[in-house]
Amino acid sequence: MTWFNKQSRLVQLLLLLIPVVNWITELVVRWTTFAKKGGLLRLIICILVTIPSGVVFGWIDFVWVLLFKKLFLQ
């Protein structure tokens, strides 16, 4: 998560815009955040991102980063 936040907004948006890359980014960011902080909501989001609907979360996060400069539910 800290690695993702250290990137420029352009790099963050590019990582979340490309379909396969956004899914991998979502997996890495969500699971590492869950491993460090835990929590039921984070676990549910991690499971939802792991299945193929993770691409949809990537696009939601793309819009969220564009508007609010952070990931959705982070």
Image (cartoon, rainbow, N blue to C red):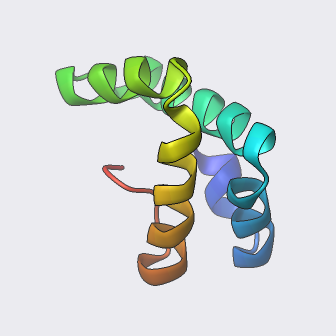
Question: In the displayed image of the protein, which residue is found farthest to the bottom?
Answer: 67
Please provide percent x and percent y for residue 22: 70, 45
Q: Quadrant of residue 27?
A: top right
Q: Residue at x 59, y 40 (%)?
A: 55
Quadrant, the N terminus: top right
Q: Residue at x 57, y 64 (%)?
A: 62
Q: Residue at x 72, y 32 (%)?
A: 24
Please provide percent x and percent y for residue 11: 80, 67
Please provide percent x and percent y for residue 71: 46, 57
Could you tell me if residue 9 is visible in this image? yes
* Viewer-nearest residue: 4 or 21: 21
Please provide percent x and percent y for residue 40: 19, 20
50 sits to left or right of 73: right
- Please tell me whether residue 1 is drawn above or below residue 35 in the rendered image: below
- Please tell me whether residue 21 is drawn above or below residue 48 in the rendered image: below
Could you tell me if residue 38 is visible in this image? no
Numbered-mark total: 0
Q: Quadrant of residue 28?
A: top right
- Please tell me whether residue 73 is drawn above or below residue 14 in the rendered image: above
